[in-house]
Structures are given as C-alpha cells and as structure tokens.
Image (tube, coloured by chain):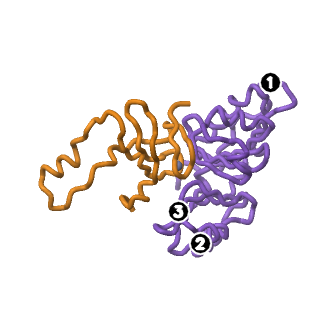
Chain colours: A orange, B purple
Amino acid sequence: MASLITCSHCGPRPKEEFTVKGDAAIARPAADASEDAWYAYVYLRDNPRGRHKEYWHHTSGCRRWLVVERDTVTHAIYAVADAAAQGETA
Amino acid sequence: MVDFALLHRSALTGAKTGAFGATSTGSRIALAALAEGHVLHLLAAHGNDDLQSLVSQIGDGGPYAVRAYGPGQWFVVGDAALSAADFSGKAALLANKASIADQSHGRVRIGISGASVEAVLAKGTAVDLDRASFAIGHSAMTLIGHISALITRTGVESFEVMVLRGFAESLWDDLIQMSLEFGVDAKTAD
Ligand SMILES: [Zn+2]
C-alpha cells in the first residue's frame, strides 16, 4: 500500500485513511487585525518545497486531527502529533 | 395510516449464504452475521478521556463488549436488545462525563474466523493484524477496501467486523470474495 503515516493513536496507517486539512504553520490573527492580515490568513498559502507542517484528519480511524511534518519532495514523514497536544485546538 | 408497513429485518437478510471458493478443508473461512442486539457509541466530554473503568460498566459484561478505538471514543456492543429504560439507565451512569448514542440499528457486526483469517483481512486493510501487535480484545477503526469498519480480535483465529448498516451487505460480499482462495462458508441468521 501507499505512504504510511504513523498516527499518534492508531499506529501506521495508509494515507487513504486520512484527509489533508492544510497548512498547520499559519497563526490566526487577532480579531481586530487588518483586512490584509485576515485576507492572508484565509486565502494566501505558500507552496513549499521540502519540510512542511500540515493538519491531517484521521477520518477513517480515530477521527483525531494531527499535525504531520513531512517533506513535500520525498514524502518522508518527520513527526506526527495530536493537534490538541499543542494547545491549538480544543 | 401509513402508506407502507415498516418491515423490521436484519441488515444481512437476503445476503448470500453457503459455501464459496476453494473446496479445501484445512483453512476455510467462516463468515457469520451476528446478533443485532445493541451497539452504543460513547464519546467522552472534553478533558474526560480517561473513563475506561466507568465505560466498562456500560457493557453487558461480555469479554469484548467495550471497544475503544480512539482517545475518548468507544463502542459498546452486546447480543441482547436494550429497552428504553436500559438505555436511559446507562446514559445516567455517564452523566456529564460522556455522551452516549444508540447505534443498535445503525451498525452491524459480522464474525469472521478461520486459520487464514489474518490473510483475508489483510487484503482490505493496512492495519498490522499480527497477534503481537493486535492482541485478543483489541479493536481498530480502519478501512476495508473503501468501507469504514471497526475490527476487533475475539480469538486466535477470529475477528468481528462492525460496519454501518447500509454497507453491511457490500462488505459481506467483499469478505466472501477475499476468502475465495481458502474456501468460505457464509451463514446469516436463520
Ligand atoms: Zn488515528
């Protein structure tokens, strides 16, 4: 089977069990931040080459949101953590 | 007046039964539609992930009644149907610590066993089914092909697969197909 992602809760699973939820490195602006800051937060994304942190949802497993650090060129996975462990989500 | 009489029947009524595939006798697979008793879905409230001892009281005492599949998430299954009073009694035990949803008519259990059962299931899922990492009593939510299912090991050569009702017959047919090389005997409730 294809690329394996080692879920913090379920162990190694194929990428087909997950849904990619986008860049995990961007920070939510303050409520009264400028329109430009909000526009960038909502719409603008880099297309990085190399190491990249993304949210992955283990849709067909434990249904937890994870932060996966991977290489967009080699698909090597460097780190996986539960997104809530960082205090980023409730 | 209703236009149609509601017909209560098992999800796998009408699924194909009998012997399929190889005629070997040594490593045949047995496929069985299990009792549609009760299936309860439990979700811990935020900050209450460690409820194992409380959740075990929700089960009927059967050996694999409580099936954990993620942080703060369990299925509780049993062969007997629950009355409304049974259900609210269980819900009261959990109070504000977890929510409970009756999935008894929403999910169906299929038993699969035989000497080659791991080889059969491995055709559909990437979960490591070896007994060293998947002990008796362990559960894993995963995909079997494109169908989401909860796999539970109930013995050295036996597993249960729990699937959404609407996918039950499709998964049943897939499991027969996956078992053909070993020979399979498929049996639904009489
Ligand atoms: Zn997982």
Secondary structure of the residue carrying numbered label 1: loop
The subunit carrying tag 2 is B
Residue at x 68% of width, y 28% of height: B177
First in sequence: mark 3 vs mark 1: 1
Q: Which residue is mark 3?
A: B43
- Residue type of the residue flagged with mark 2: Ser
The picture places residue A7, in percent across and down from the top left corner, at: 52, 47
Neighbour class for label 3 at 10 Å: few (<14), some, many (≥20)?
some
Q: Is residue A84 left or right of residue B131?
A: left
Q: Which residue is mark 2?
A: B88
First in sequence: mark 2 vs mark 1: 1
Residue B30 bears which disc, if any?
A: none
Residue at x 74% of width, y 41% of height: B112
Residue B22 bears which disc, if any?
A: 1
Residue at x 48% of width, y 46% of height: A59
As drawn, the residue found furthest toward the right would be: B25
Q: Is the CB of mark 3 within 8 Å of ligand 1? A: no
The picture places residue B109, in percent across and down from the top left corner, at: 67, 48
For marks 3 and 1, give the CA distance: 43 Å
